[in-house]
Image (spheres, grey):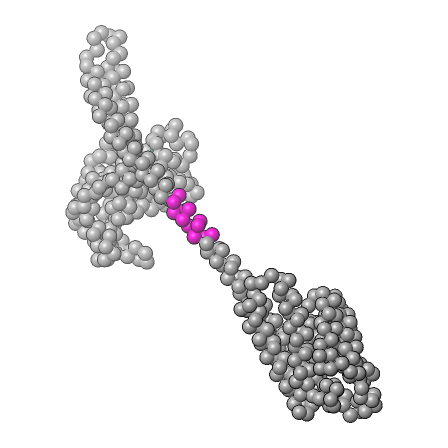
Amino acid sequence: MGFRDMFLMNLGMLISVAYLANIAYKYLFNRTSSKVKYVSSVVLMILAGWICMRFGFRLSDNVIFDLRFVPLLISTVVYSQPWTIMIIGIGIGLVRLTFGVNEAALAGLYNLALLGVICAGLNIWMRRSTVRLVVKATITILVVNIFNTVNVSIFGVIPFKKYMLELAPLLFPLGVILSALFAVMLRDFQLEQKRKLELEYTNDLLKKQTEELQRTKIKLEERANQLLMASQYKSEFLANMSHELRTPLNSILNLAQIIKESEPAHEEDENPSYGAIIHKSGEELLQLINDILDLSKVEAGRLEIVIDEVSIREIAEVMELQFQHLAQQKGLDFEIRFDQDLPESIQSDSLRLQQVLRNLIANAFKFTEAGKVKLEIRKERGNGQDPGQWIVFAVTDTGIGIPEDKHSLVFEAFQQSDGSISRKYGGTGLGLSISRDLAALLGGCIRLQSKQGVGSTFSLYLPVNYEAEREGRFP
Ligand code: ADP
């Protein structure tokens, strides 16, 4: 076997050892303690050195040429403790003696022990220096190869001149090239290992986060269920309570009506006027109870609607009749306008539709001191999210208006646009909330346009065909 074959053979053996070590690490040492891992890796490095010698080029019976310094070179990059590198250097030197104790073997021992010390120094420098890894690796490879050549020429059994002139010119470049090749492979292996570790870490992290998310999701679901139940109990309680309150209240109202209409027994008899006060307050209370009853019924999903053909003209007439008197009383115009191509009727719940309109128109009158209130009924073709045909009942007034930032607030239960409203205009802040829920129940919605001090327009959108809208079929 010539030099070249020896180098290739050594390189092949080193690659095989590295590959086997990788497998052993993966399947055998992966779960062992760090101490066991450390000791086995040191033994492996020394063994790799021994294998290089075993398949080295035998110049004579005692003289062996090989790449035994390559495992030491690798150790310089891999380990962080300099004394480990020294142990490996001395270890490889000592195993040289297993091929026979003679002058050449002892020279090999000195050489490797010395290289161990040099590599330990290089290891310290590599960890402290801030130059790029490629530069560090190149310098280390060159230094180790130079020292190896010098050591062998000094301690070796081959005369200095012969070695330097005949052997070194071939051995040195080959040594450098093959060490560099091995260094590249090692670096690649290291990067792969690093990537694997990073992947494992990210995987673990993801697993933990998924578990955490799962736990939070379960907790949230539990909370949501509890909240739903609590809200349902509350709504049911309110619905039952309001219902129960109405019966005695109706009796009080009837009695108050009788007292109010009775003839005064004498001139100072104030009973009829007391009766009138009780009757008025009772009616307000009944209205409040009715509102709460409606709201809680909608929330508990217990409010049922009856869908039928509803004549648009009839609805408008009912509204006109109901509010004509109030308009005159307040000195306001009340105008009702119809679009030209309106259908005769729509599919809806007449009573609930009237309730919403009554609410919107009553509010318009309540919050308007001068000007007019207008009910405009028109047809609109929806687009985007709400295709299909819609009938819009737009109630416009020239009243106090609502500030922009309160537009969504006024639809919340018990909310008014500001604190003075209740004192000045009365009311409880329930009307719009009920109207919004009823509009949704009828398959529509309420939109608000308003400017403070100018007026407001509340538009009730209802589908022309309730069933088709609900099933997603758009006429
Ligand atoms: P209420 O009228 O009993 O206070 P609503 O829910 O019907 O309750 O209305 C909530 C609030 O919305 C009112 O208190 C008022 O501040 C505001 N609002 C409603 N309609 C109008 C309107 N047409 N013009 C001005 N503000 C209005």
The question of residue 157 being in magenta is answered with no
Q: Who is closer to the viewer here, 277 or 332?
A: 277
Relative placement, left or right, of 117 versus 353 is right
Residue shown at the point (46%, 54%) measured from the top left? 211
In the picture, the quarter occupied by the C terminus is bottom left
Q: Is residue 288 visible?
A: yes
In the image, residue 231 lies at what x, y percent? Answer: 34, 38
Residue shown at the point (39%, 28%) measured from the top left? 423
Relative placement, left or right, of 35 versus 332 is right
Residue shown at the point (18%, 51%) measured from the top left? 343
User: What secondary structure do most residues of the magenta stretch adopt?
Assistant: helix
Where residue 123 sits, quadrant-wise, is bottom right
Q: Who is closer to the viewer here, 223 or 466?
A: 223
Where residue 331 sits, quadrant-wise, is top left
In the image, residue 403 lies at what x, y percent? Answer: 42, 41
Identify whether 196 is placed above or below 5: above
Q: Is residue 146 visible?
A: no
Relative placement, left or right, of 237 versus 45 is left
What number of labels is visible? 0
Q: Which residues are magenta?
A: 212-223
In the picture, the quarter occupied by the N terminus is bottom right
Q: Who is closer to the viewer here, 35 or 168?
A: 35
Where residue 122 sits, quadrant-wise, is bottom right
In the image, residue 60 lies at what x, y percent? Answer: 74, 90
Q: Who is closer to the viewer here, 83 or 355?
A: 83
Residue shown at the point (73%, 89%) measured from the top left? 61
In the image, residue 279 lies at what x, y percent? Answer: 25, 21
